Image (tube, rainbow, N blue to C red):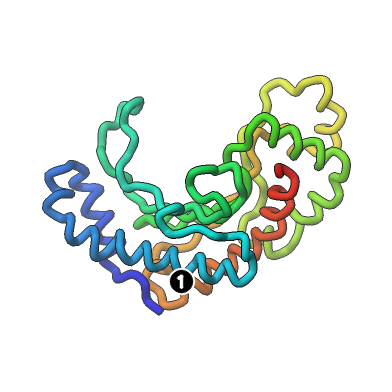
Amino acid sequence: MHYFTEDFVLFFKDLAKNNHKDWFHDNKNRYEKSVKKPFEVFVEKLIEEIQRYDSDIMIKPKDCILRINRDIRFSKDKSPYNLHYTAFVSREGRKDKSIPGIFLRFSPEMIGIMGGCFGPSKEQLHRIRTTISKDATTFKDLLEHTDFVQRFGEIRGETMKRIPKEWQEACKKEPLIANKQFYFVGEEASGLISSRNLIEEIMKYWHAMRPINEYLLKTIQ
């Protein structure tokens, strides 16, 4: 099934040249037709597909999709609109990015497909580090799974600048314990957005990230 026309990408290319409220207002109907409404339909279908494997996903598209408006309060760049469209599909949706799920960013350049823990709390981070330090082999086996490596490569995230004494020995055995975040990123060409195989291809990434997402979810709860 096709969820998007080629105008999804063209809209953002035009927006990049005209990132101001007057242009957006004049193209509001185009935005609704080519971007907002089809993205809602797509996310709803994606949720339905994920629910086949995870019945605890009980959210709606409105709980997942982020606004196109940028938060410019503390930014030097006062452009009012993002040049991409995003959604975070997890058990808590966009309101809690510490909960592992699948984060999607559709742009003219690419589709970004991300998973893991983006913003764990201090307590959640301590649980992750403790769990890994007790059994680093299980964690390492998940990271070395062929499907994960092919689609995401490795775990990313900001690391501690100074490692506390309590974690120094553990970090020697598994350096990722020094991470403040545990996320991973895959990419697809933007041409996939208008493909009839979009959901099928995105679900391949979801299945590849599922073991690590579930490991992290079990750890932080």
Identify the residue shown where x is 33% and y is 69%. 4
* In-front residue for pair 141/115: 115
Three-letter amino acid code of the residue under disc 1 = Leu
Image quarter in which the C terminus is found? top right
Left or right for 42, reference 9: right
Number of numbered markers: 1
Identified at 18% across, 49% down, the residue is 24
Q: Is residue 146 above or below residue 85?
A: below
Residue 213 in the figure: left or right of residue 173: left
- Disc 1 target residue: 198
Q: Is 164 drawn above or below residue 81 in the view shown? A: above
Q: Nearer the viewer, residue 76 or 94?
A: 94
Residue 30, image x and y in percent? 19, 61
Question: In the figure, is residue 24 to the left or right of 138?
Answer: left
Q: Position of residue 2 (x, y in %)?
A: 37, 76
Count residues near mark 1 (Cα–Cα under 10 Å), then give few for <14, some for 14-19, many for 20+: some
Q: What residue is shown at x 65% (from left), y 42% (from top)? A: 182
- Residue 75: percent from the left, percent from the top? 34, 28
Q: Is residue 183 visible?
A: no
Name the quadrant of the N terminus: bottom left
Residue at image x 49%, y 52%?
A: 88
Horizontal arrangement in the rendering, residue 106 relative to residue 47 (left or right): left
Residue 25, position in %: x, y? Answer: 14, 49
Instruction: Quadrant for residue 195, please give it.
Output: bottom left
Question: Residue 45 or 180: which is nearer the viewer?
Answer: 45
Q: Quadrant of residue 144?
A: bottom right
SS type, badge 1? helix
Nearest to the observer: residue 200 or residue 6: 200
